[in-house]
Image (tube, rainbow, N blue to C red):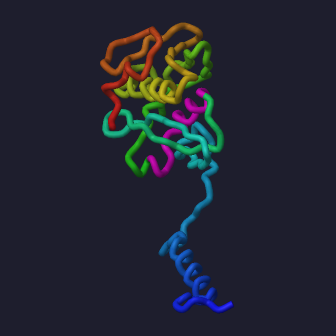
Amino acid sequence: MKKPAGTPPRGRLALLAVLLLAGCGVPADDQPRDLGRSQVAYGSDAPAPDRFGPAVERLYLVGDGGLVRVVRRTPAPRSPAQMVQDLVAGPTRAEQQDGLTSALAQMRVGSTSVSQRRAAVEIGAPPVPGARSDEALAYAQIVCTLTSQGAEVGTVSFTRDGQTLAVPRGDGSLSTGPLTIADYAELIRS
Protein backbone atom coordinates (compact mmCIF):
# COMPACT_ATOMS: atom_id res chain seq x y z
CA MET A 1 0.00 0.00 0.00
CA LYS A 2 1.41 3.33 -1.03
CA LYS A 3 1.23 6.43 1.26
CA PRO A 4 -0.31 9.59 -0.17
CA ALA A 5 2.17 12.33 -1.00
CA GLY A 6 2.89 14.82 1.85
CA THR A 7 2.15 12.37 4.69
CA PRO A 8 4.98 12.46 7.28
CA PRO A 9 6.48 9.14 8.33
CA ARG A 10 5.28 7.64 11.64
CA GLY A 11 8.71 8.15 13.20
CA ARG A 12 8.47 11.91 12.71
CA LEU A 13 4.98 12.01 14.23
CA ALA A 14 6.14 10.05 17.26
CA LEU A 15 9.16 12.34 17.71
CA LEU A 16 6.96 15.42 17.40
CA ALA A 17 4.53 14.03 20.01
CA VAL A 18 7.39 13.28 22.44
CA LEU A 19 8.82 16.80 22.03
CA LEU A 20 5.43 18.43 22.57
CA LEU A 21 4.73 16.38 25.70
CA ALA A 22 8.20 17.06 27.12
CA GLY A 23 7.41 20.79 27.13
CA CYS A 24 4.42 20.19 29.44
CA GLY A 25 6.42 19.07 32.46
CA VAL A 26 7.03 20.76 35.79
CA PRO A 27 9.89 23.27 35.63
CA ALA A 28 12.97 22.57 37.73
CA ASP A 29 13.88 24.77 40.72
CA ASP A 30 17.08 26.79 40.65
CA GLN A 31 17.88 25.71 44.23
CA PRO A 32 17.11 22.47 46.10
CA ARG A 33 14.19 22.64 48.54
CA ASP A 34 12.84 20.44 51.31
CA LEU A 35 9.44 18.94 50.48
CA GLY A 36 9.11 17.00 53.74
CA ARG A 37 6.16 17.65 56.03
CA SER A 38 6.59 19.20 59.46
CA GLN A 39 6.10 16.97 62.51
CA VAL A 40 5.01 19.69 64.96
CA ALA A 41 2.76 18.80 67.90
CA TYR A 42 -0.37 20.87 68.48
CA GLY A 43 -0.20 23.52 71.15
CA SER A 44 3.51 24.21 70.72
CA ASP A 45 5.03 27.57 69.85
CA ALA A 46 6.01 26.23 66.43
CA PRO A 47 3.70 26.79 63.44
CA ALA A 48 1.00 24.30 62.55
CA PRO A 49 2.03 21.53 60.15
CA ASP A 50 1.34 21.91 56.45
CA ARG A 51 -0.90 19.04 55.31
CA PHE A 52 -2.13 18.01 51.91
CA GLY A 53 -5.10 15.98 50.75
CA PRO A 54 -8.42 15.92 48.93
CA ALA A 55 -10.57 17.41 51.75
CA VAL A 56 -11.00 21.16 52.30
CA GLU A 57 -10.82 22.91 55.67
CA ARG A 58 -11.74 26.59 55.97
CA LEU A 59 -10.16 28.38 58.92
CA TYR A 60 -10.34 32.00 60.02
CA LEU A 61 -7.01 33.48 61.11
CA VAL A 62 -6.07 37.03 62.08
CA GLY A 63 -4.60 39.44 59.54
CA ASP A 64 -4.78 43.21 59.07
CA GLY A 65 -6.63 43.61 62.38
CA GLY A 66 -9.48 41.32 61.34
CA LEU A 67 -10.34 37.81 60.23
CA VAL A 68 -8.98 36.28 57.04
CA ARG A 69 -10.33 32.99 55.70
CA VAL A 70 -7.71 30.47 54.66
CA VAL A 71 -8.30 27.18 52.90
CA ARG A 72 -6.23 24.14 53.79
CA ARG A 73 -6.18 20.75 52.11
CA THR A 74 -6.37 17.80 54.51
CA PRO A 75 -6.20 14.02 54.10
CA ALA A 76 -9.80 13.64 55.37
CA PRO A 77 -12.65 15.95 56.43
CA ARG A 78 -11.97 17.51 59.84
CA SER A 79 -14.42 17.28 62.74
CA PRO A 80 -15.40 20.48 64.60
CA ALA A 81 -13.10 19.46 67.49
CA GLN A 82 -10.20 18.96 65.07
CA MET A 83 -10.85 22.34 63.45
CA VAL A 84 -10.68 24.02 66.86
CA GLN A 85 -7.39 22.18 67.49
CA ASP A 86 -6.11 23.47 64.15
CA LEU A 87 -7.01 27.03 65.19
CA VAL A 88 -5.20 26.61 68.51
CA ALA A 89 -2.15 25.25 66.66
CA GLY A 90 -2.09 28.51 64.71
CA PRO A 91 -1.00 29.37 61.19
CA THR A 92 1.31 27.24 59.07
CA ARG A 93 4.71 28.63 58.06
CA ALA A 94 3.30 29.76 54.71
CA GLU A 95 0.36 31.47 56.45
CA GLN A 96 2.78 33.17 58.86
CA GLN A 97 4.79 34.42 55.89
CA ASP A 98 1.55 35.94 54.58
CA GLY A 99 1.29 37.89 57.86
CA LEU A 100 -1.41 35.76 59.48
CA THR A 101 -1.54 35.04 63.22
CA SER A 102 -4.00 33.66 65.76
CA ALA A 103 -5.71 35.38 68.67
CA LEU A 104 -6.06 32.01 70.39
CA ALA A 105 -2.44 31.80 71.58
CA GLN A 106 -3.29 32.73 75.21
CA MET A 107 -6.76 31.15 75.31
CA ARG A 108 -7.29 27.77 76.95
CA VAL A 109 -9.67 25.86 74.72
CA GLY A 110 -11.07 22.56 75.99
CA SER A 111 -13.53 20.13 74.50
CA THR A 112 -15.81 20.79 71.55
CA SER A 113 -19.09 18.94 71.12
CA VAL A 114 -21.96 19.25 68.64
CA SER A 115 -25.63 18.59 69.34
CA GLN A 116 -28.50 19.59 67.03
CA ARG A 117 -26.20 21.77 64.89
CA ARG A 118 -24.95 23.75 67.93
CA ALA A 119 -21.29 23.47 68.82
CA ALA A 120 -20.40 23.94 72.47
CA VAL A 121 -16.80 24.93 73.11
CA GLU A 122 -15.37 24.76 76.63
CA ILE A 123 -13.07 27.66 77.47
CA GLY A 124 -10.72 27.40 80.44
CA ALA A 125 -9.87 30.23 82.81
CA PRO A 126 -7.29 32.60 81.34
CA PRO A 127 -3.70 31.87 82.43
CA VAL A 128 -3.30 35.50 83.49
CA PRO A 129 -6.45 37.31 84.67
CA GLY A 130 -7.21 40.59 82.91
CA ALA A 131 -8.73 42.02 79.78
CA ARG A 132 -7.37 41.14 76.37
CA SER A 133 -7.70 43.40 73.37
CA ASP A 134 -7.98 40.48 70.92
CA GLU A 135 -10.62 38.51 72.82
CA ALA A 136 -13.36 39.26 70.25
CA LEU A 137 -11.04 38.04 67.47
CA ALA A 138 -10.34 34.81 69.38
CA TYR A 139 -14.03 33.96 69.74
CA ALA A 140 -14.67 35.14 66.18
CA GLN A 141 -12.02 32.73 64.85
CA ILE A 142 -13.82 29.78 66.45
CA VAL A 143 -17.37 30.84 65.52
CA CYS A 144 -16.56 31.75 61.92
CA THR A 145 -14.50 28.59 61.36
CA LEU A 146 -17.11 26.22 62.76
CA THR A 147 -20.15 27.83 61.11
CA SER A 148 -18.57 28.19 57.65
CA GLN A 149 -17.99 24.48 57.02
CA GLY A 150 -21.45 23.49 55.88
CA ALA A 151 -24.50 21.97 57.52
CA GLU A 152 -22.88 20.29 60.56
CA VAL A 153 -22.63 23.42 62.75
CA GLY A 154 -25.11 26.31 62.57
CA THR A 155 -24.37 28.09 65.86
CA VAL A 156 -21.67 28.14 68.54
CA SER A 157 -21.88 28.70 72.28
CA PHE A 158 -19.11 28.86 74.86
CA THR A 159 -18.97 27.42 78.36
CA ARG A 160 -16.62 27.53 81.34
CA ASP A 161 -16.96 24.84 83.99
CA GLY A 162 -20.29 23.83 82.41
CA GLN A 163 -21.79 27.35 82.67
CA THR A 164 -22.69 29.49 79.66
CA LEU A 165 -20.03 32.12 79.04
CA ALA A 166 -20.77 35.70 77.90
CA VAL A 167 -18.39 36.46 75.03
CA PRO A 168 -17.80 39.58 72.93
CA ARG A 169 -19.39 39.84 69.52
CA GLY A 170 -17.84 41.76 66.64
CA ASP A 171 -19.51 45.01 67.71
CA GLY A 172 -18.11 44.67 71.26
CA SER A 173 -21.41 43.72 72.92
CA LEU A 174 -21.50 40.61 75.12
CA SER A 175 -23.67 37.64 74.25
CA THR A 176 -24.56 34.45 76.10
CA GLY A 177 -26.70 33.23 73.21
CA PRO A 178 -25.66 31.03 70.32
CA LEU A 179 -23.43 32.87 67.84
CA THR A 180 -23.09 32.72 64.07
CA ILE A 181 -20.69 34.13 61.50
CA ALA A 182 -23.09 37.10 61.14
CA ASP A 183 -22.18 38.18 64.70
CA TYR A 184 -18.62 38.85 63.47
CA ALA A 185 -19.28 40.09 59.91
CA GLU A 186 -17.60 43.46 60.56
CA LEU A 187 -14.35 41.67 61.50
CA ILE A 188 -14.06 39.65 58.27
CA ARG A 189 -11.59 40.98 55.69
CA SER A 190 -11.95 39.96 52.07
67 to the left or right of 30: left
Residue range of the region highlighted in magenta in the rendering: 80-95
Residue at screen point 53% across, 77% down: 20
23 or 99, which lies in front? 23
Residue at screen point 44% across, 34% down: 60
Q: Is residue 160 above or below residue 37?
A: above
**Residue 17 sits in quarter:** bottom right
In the rendered image, residue 19, in percent from the top left (x then y), is placed at 55, 81
Can residue 120 be seen?
no
187 or 20, which lies in front? 20
Query: Is 11 one of the magenta-colored residues?
Result: no
Quadrant location, the C terminus: top left
Query: Is 94 one of the magenta-colored residues?
Result: yes
**Residue 185 sits in quarter:** top left
In the rendered image, residue 101, in percent from the top left (x then y), is placed at 42, 40
In the rendered image, residue 167, in percent from the top left (x then y), is placed at 42, 15
In the rendered image, residue 160, in percent from the top left (x then y), is placed at 54, 13
Q: Is residue 121 above or below residue 176?
A: below
Q: Is residue 132 above or below residue 2?
A: above
Quadrant location, the N terminus: bottom right
Can residue 174 be seen?
yes
Residue at screen point 33% across, 35% down: 189
